[in-house]
Amino acid sequence: MLADELHFARAAAKLNIAAPTLSAQIQGLEALLGARLLTRQTRGVALTHVGKRFLEEARATLKRAERAELVGRRAAKGEMGSLTVGYILSAACSGMVTSSVVAFRKSHPGISVQFRRMQTIPQLSALTEGSMDVGFVRAPARLPAGLAGFIVDRQALCVAMPEDHPLASSNIIEPRMLVGETFVATSIESEAGYWSNIGAIMPAGKTPKVAARVADMTSVLLSVAAGFGLGIVPESLARYAIDGVAFRRVAGEYRTLDYLMAFRADESTPVVKAFIAALRAQARSAA
C-alpha cells in the first residue's frame, strides 16, 4: 500500500493503522534486510533501487501464493490433480476408457491422465499396492480385500478364426459347430475367467480342446492368425484389426463379459473420488 501511495499518512489511513505504526513496520523490515527501502521526501516518500526490486519480488510472491491457494482449493475439490488409469485391451477397443476420460475432463479440465495397459490380475495388484488409481478390468469372481468396483460395460463373446477357416463362411456360429475344434487361450495367471468363456459357448457335456496358452489377448489373435486354433474373445476385439483373422458372433443367448472399474474402497484422493463418482453416475444412467 505504501509503495502505491508513496505517502505514510494516506497509506496508514487505507490500512486502518496509525502512521507511526506503519513507519515502525517499515523500519523493522529495513533492519531485517539491512538496506533502505524508502527515502523521505518533502511531500512523501520514494522507493530506493533496493525497494523497487524488493517490491517486484514481493508482488510476484503474493501472486504465487494466491495461485498456490487456488490450486490447493481446486485440488481439494477434485478439480485438479492426476489420475493413473489401468485398462485391458478389450476395454480400450470398446471405447469405454477414452469416453469416460473425455467426459470427465470436460468438467475437470485441470486434470492429467496417465494410461497403463495391464491385464486384470496385475491391475488388481497395482491398485492394492497404490501404484495405480483406477482400473478397467474384467470382472473377477471376487475382488481382493480392500478393493471395490462396479460394472461399466457388458460385452458378448465372439469367435476369432483364420479367414480361410471353413467356419468363416458362416455369419453366425452355432455352438455345435465348435465341437472338435481346438482353441487358443490365455494363461490362467494373465487373465480372469478366460477358460469359462470358451466353456460357455460349447454344447453341454462337450469339453473344449486348448492347443496353446498365451500371455494376452493380442497373442491370442496372433496365434489365431497363425493357424494354431480358434479364439473366444469379447466382441470389441473385432475392431482390433489383425490380418488374416475373421470374427463371428455366436448364436443364442450365451455368456457375456462384465467389465468393472475397480478402485480402492477407502480411496481418499479428491480427484480419484470425483472420477469414480462421475463414472458411477454414468453407469447408473446407462443401466
Image (cartoon, rainbow, N blue to C red):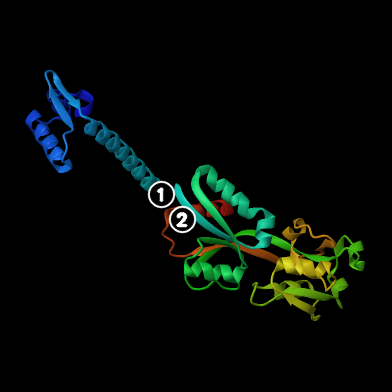
Determine if residue 1 is in view. Answer: no
For label 1, count other residues whose C-alpha is less than 10 Å away and answer few (under 14), some (14-19) or many (20+).
some
Q: Nearer the viewer, residue 35 or 43?
A: 35
Q: Secondary structure at mark 1?
A: helix
Q: Relative to 120, is 91 above or below?
A: above
- Mark linked to residue 273: 2
Q: Residue at x 62, y 51 (%)?
A: 98
Residue type marked 2:
Lys
Look at mark 1 in the image and give the residue it sits on. Answer: 75
Image quadrant in which you'd find residue 250: bottom right
Left or right of residue 261, residue 180 in this image: right
Left or right of residue 127, residue 186 in this image: right
For label 2, count other residues whose C-alpha is less than 10 Å away and answer few (under 14), some (14-19) or many (20+).
some
Residue type marked 1:
Ala
Q: Residue at x 53, y 71 (%)?
A: 125
Q: Relative to 134, is 109 above or below?
A: above
Quadrant where the C terminus lies? bottom right
Q: CA distance from mark 1 to mark 2?
A: 12 Å
Image quadrant in which you'd find residue 96: bottom right
- Mark linked to residue 263: none
Q: Residue 27: x, y in percent? A: 11, 36
Q: Residue 268: x, y in percent? A: 41, 59
Left or right of residue 196, residue 78 in this image: left
Q: Secondary structure at mark 2?
A: helix
Determine if residue 260 is in view. Answer: yes
Mark 1 near mark 2, Cβ–Cβ under 8 Å? Answer: no
